Every structure is written in C-alpha cells, then in structure tokens.
Image: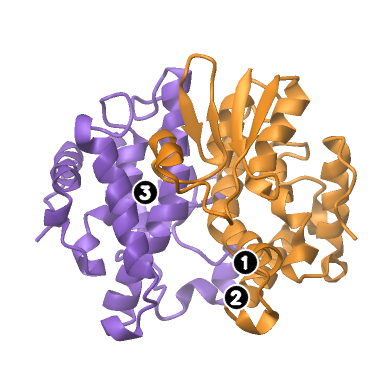
Chain colours: A orange, B purple
Amino acid sequence: MLTVYGDSGSGNCLKVKFIADRFGIPLKWIEVGVVNGETRTPQFLAMNPAGQVPTVVFDDGRILAQSNAIMLHLAEGSDLIPGEAFDRALMFQWLFWEQYSHETAIAVRRYHKMFLKKSDAEIDPALMPKCERALDVMEGHLSNRSYFVAERLSLADIALVAYTRFAHEAGLDLVKWPQVRAWVIRIECDLGLKTALP
Amino acid sequence: MLTVYGDSGSGNCLKVKFIADRFGIPLKWIEVGVVNGETRTPQFLAMNPAGQVPTVVFDDGRILAQSNAIMLHLAEGSDLIPGEAFDRALMFQWLFWEQYSHETAIAVRRYHKMFLKKSDAEIDPALMPKCERALDVMEGHLSNRSYFVAERLSLADIALVAYTRFAHEAGLDLVKWPQVRAWVIRIECDLGLKTALP
C-alpha cells in the first residue's frame, strides 16, 4: 500500500495516481490542501521539510517527494522509461523542462486563477507569455511526433500532460496549439482518462 | 568530443563541465551569453527551441538540454548515481527539488543582482525568503549527513552545489547556514575545485 499525501487539484499529485492506477499499485490518498496551508503545518514539515505535495510514504516508512521522482521510482523497469540510453536522456530532459519551464508557468497561472481566485489583472503579467512559450515549444516538438520521446508513451508525456490538460483553467485555449491539443487527448486516452479539455 | 553551448557564469552550465572533467570527457565549450540574448537567436533556437543553456551536441549530432538530464546521461553507470533503487529515487527527488525550489530562488536572485546589475530594491522581494527557505531545507537535511544521499557523493550534491557555492552573489551569507557552508567546501574539494565562497 502506497500512502499519498496529495492535493487532488494538483496535476503534480495526480501524476502519482496515474502511475499507481496503471500498474495496479494499491494507493491510500490523504488529501492535503495547499491553499489552506496544510503543507506547512509542523506535522507535514516533519514528514517533508520542503512542504510540498505529492509526498508518498511506503509501507516500510520510507518517504519520497517530488512528483517526477516518485513516478520514476514507481515506473522503474517498466515500458514508461525508454530502454535506450539516449531516449532515456531525452525523457529526463523533458521531465526537467516540465518542472522548470512548464509547471512554473501553466500550473502557477492556473493556481492563481482557479485556487487563489485572482482576476487576470491581479496575476503576474509575465506568466501568460511564459505559458504561451511553453506551449509553443511543445507544439513545435509535436509537429512531427505523436509522443515526446521515441514515439511511444513515456513518463515525459505523463509529466507534461498533468497540467497541459488543465491549460484552459490557466486561461489558455489549446485550439491555438492543435498538435498539443490532439496529443493531450491521446495521452489521456492511453491513461484511460476522460479528457479534461473543454 | 562533447560540444557544450554554455554561459560560463551559469551554475547549470558548469555542472556539465564538472562531470566532463571528472570522467575525462573531452569538451569543446562554446560561450553563449544569456544576458545578451544569444540563447534566443534563430540559430540557437533551431538547436534548442527552449532557448536554454546548457545545450550539448554529441559527435553524432544528437542534441541534449537541461543540466541535470545531461549530467545523468554523462554519469550513467558511474558511482555518481546510487545503485540502490531507493537511494536513486532520493537522488532524483533532490535533482527535481534543485531545479524547482533552489535554482529558481538562488540562481534567479544572483542573476538579477550580478548579471542584470539590479539593486536589492529592484529585485522581487519574494526571492529572498525563498532563497532562505531553500537553504533552511538543506541545513536541516545536512544536520546529520555529509552528503545528500547515501553518505557519498552523487549527482544530487553536484546539482545543488552548482549555485549554492555562489549564494553570496545572490546576497546570502552562508555563515548563517554552517552545515551548508561546510558541505559546499566538501563537495568543491571532491570535485577538485577551489572554493568559490568568500
């Protein structure tokens, strides 16, 4: 049994559920709200001093944080991690890009809009062009591909789809990025998810 | 021969040099200035659409970006990547935390201060507490450890030291974080570097 401390509104947290569901790993979900400060209580910080979800606890008590690190651990040895070394390197490239350049734009703008209920005028104006740039990079990469790496589903797709499927909640209409839109639906289908797109 | 497109002022770019030097990988460094826009020229974007350094090109023409992905690829099979699965998962946890919570604070504040030559008043005031929080997390982790994972040098230490050793250039005095300060000098020593600390 894997215990997941997660916020069900968080794409990062849902990544863990996607992988657990795919591999039939039994999961106990403990809801931890980011907005109401539940990741910054002394109890939570004792478990994960970084104060972030998802944080998972294994049966033996070992604790692991960072969504992409958790996915890598749960998916080790599976076909979600390319066997060829350079393909695997490219998967890592996209996993780090997702956390550095994509999540910090699309997830952050969505958080301010949907969870902190800010108006567009109250949201940092630098976020929208950063979001658009991330989607432009994805659109270009997908112009002649169906998946991010090696033409098959990998953790790169799962990491990137986690927030891209909620891009509309960040104020972005994926109709402007048609390859990205088609890819979102493809990955959701591969994961057995109903589309989150409007 | 590995061709590295990098900015020698960037800790992310220096990570690639640290690994290449450690393994005796011949390296051709092509200086690309971030401040003067050289990562956003059409030529550079044709190579890396994300417009980021480091970007490396292998002899066969294959291109890889993202500092931690490049390190993982160059260090594959070496003792810088823990052999035990959970230790490896913890290494990944710190690699992702570094890019999400550490680089985005300390490297960004340093960039505004040292490279964009902004005064403290011109720098986003949210950055300093974010920097301090990152160092607090590291100080706590190092309170009973000499290395981040499994008590030996791994990519987690190398990723984290890249900007921590320049914390003073971001306006932080590591004297306030003595375990972090000692660890910086330890990792610099392991890497054969003269300390960058004042």
Secondary structure, mark 2, is: helix
Image position, residue A103 (x, y; %):
61, 57
Write the residue at 18% across / 36% down. B190
Residue B6 seen by the camera: no
Q: Which chain letter matches label 1?
A: B
Question: Please, what is the three-letter code of the amino acid marked with disc 1?
Answer: Ala
Write the residue at 33% across / 64% down. B129
Secondary structure, mark 1, is: helix
- Other residues around mark 1 within 10 Å, as few (<14) / some (14–19) / many (≥20): few
Residue A173 seen by the camera: yes
Q: Closer to the N terminus: mark 1 or mark 3?
A: 3
Circle nearer the viewer, 1 or 3:
3
CA distance for labels 2 and 3: 24 Å
Image position, residue B74 (x, y; %):
42, 37
As drawn, B171 above or below B183: below
Write the residue at 43% across / 42% down. B95
Circle nearer the viewer, 2 or 3:
3
Q: Which residue is mark 2?
A: B42
Q: Residue furthest left?
A: B198
Q: Which chain letter matches label 3?
A: B
Q: Which mark is residue B16?
A: 3
